[in-house]
Amino acid sequence: MKIIPVILSGGVGSRLWPLSREHFPKQCLPLTDKEYSLLQQTILRTQSLEVGDPIIVCNEDHRFLIAQQLQSIGVKNARIVLVLEGRNTAPAIALAAFEAMLDPSDDAIMLVLPADHVIRDIAAFEATIKQAVELAKDDALVTFGVQPTRPETGYGYIRSGEHFAVVEFVEKPNLEKAQAYLDSGEYLWNSGMFLFRAKAFLDELAVHRGDIYQAVSHAYQQRTEDLDFVRIDATLFAQCPEESIDFAVMEPTKKAKVVPYAGDWSDIGAWDALYDYADKDADNNVLLGDVMVEGSTNCLIRSESRLIAAVGVQDLVIVETADAVLVMDKNNAQDVKKVVKRIQAEGREEHMFHTTVHRPWGSYQTVDLGNRHQVKRIMVKPGEKLSVQMHHHRAEHWVVVSGTAKVQNGDREILLTENESTYIPVGVVHALENPGKIPLELVEVQSGSYLGEDDIVRFSDRYGR
């Protein structure tokens, strides 16, 4: 039987704002590793298991970012399944199961992993999976229960019995119950990781939640392929009931098993969880980036673009990005969502984008923004091209800083190199391409009555936008 990693990458992680944004979610950030994002770490930890090509289920808005992250770690044949609107884990896993069963000769075993978990004990992780595979061969639906190390109130629990039996699932407890669960030795944290045969899961879904099975099946049958992506019919999928795999399948089924995992594990859901997981200095501080502290203890301080100096403070989370700074009592980590909701309600964009925005062709960074002007620094990767487009409300002036630009400006096609420029009036069809071997860097000055990103009329686009 072939093991196929299924990575669920649908969340945003608003409790990790300002680092996590809607268009650059937490799973794509290197939160616990200097080199690899949480998503990349999740895929890399499966590679020694001799697995098949992974299936990623993700939000359509994140498709190019995720594809780029996979390519950068050498994963070239992943199947990226796109959903426009999330419907929780049961429908997402069902989509992956249908995708895994495309080849009827493959009796695929799915290893379902959230994209935002951190596991450093790879040997214990592999041993747990090998136990689960033996159970899955007999059609068991296996979940992984993490051996608890503290009376945690933020996780659900699984009461385990003999021979990997699941006695019951329990919701997040209060502190008194959590302590009782820990003392009993019978309860495990519900990790949200699973392993089962794709067909076994779909069969149980059809029995216990036939409405979800039918809705997902219809949406999947109407899928289309777009470049490297599998695009699910958005209208049909939106009609699917929203439900977790626990409520839809794992609780009602008679085939559930739980395999204990005793290695290190963390669900990096908020800043306090990241603080608990990270290595600390002699004063119990987690200091990341350009940070200086004096007389400060028990703090997490992260700088992205400038010096942070903290003097005489305790139990704070301080996170700085180019356009926002969060200062918070570490004990109020769950309340970051309230700030994000206020930002959204006031029509601001700090919850959506960083000042540097990644696109399939490269990236751009907003340098200055006024009432009738905007200045951007644009980078176009070698061989890539922006869409053929026009704007109703703004003109643009491009100045090449380095590299070579191939520009369509109305009826003209021109080549620009360092220190050369072109002006594109309002309403003129234009396109920008990097025909060279090195990144193209240029400065774009926009002027006009409206400068929003939705003032783009695309005529053709190689990325299917």
Image (spheres, grey):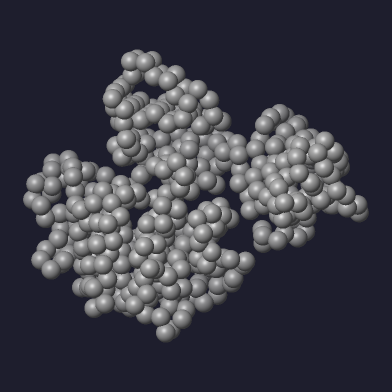
Placement of the N terminus among the 4 image quadrants: bottom left
The image position of residue 3, as x and y in percent, is: 36, 71
Taking depth in this image into account, of 448 and 9 the one nearest to the observer is 9
Task: Report whether 342 appears left or right of 300.
Answer: right
The image position of residue 404, as x and y in percent, is: 79, 46
Q: Residue at x 28, y 49 (%)?
A: 265
Residue 152 in view of the camera: yes
Taking depth in this image into account, of 398 and 388 the one nearest to the observer is 398
Name above or below for residue 313 compared with residue 101: above
Q: Residue at x 43, y 78 (%)?
A: 101
The image position of residue 244, as x and y in percent, is: 34, 60
Classify residue 136 by image quadrant: bottom left
Outermost residue, right side: 411
Name above or below for residue 35 compared with residue 216: above
Name above or below for residue 68 compared with residue 426: below
Q: Residue at x 46, y 66 (%)?
A: 55
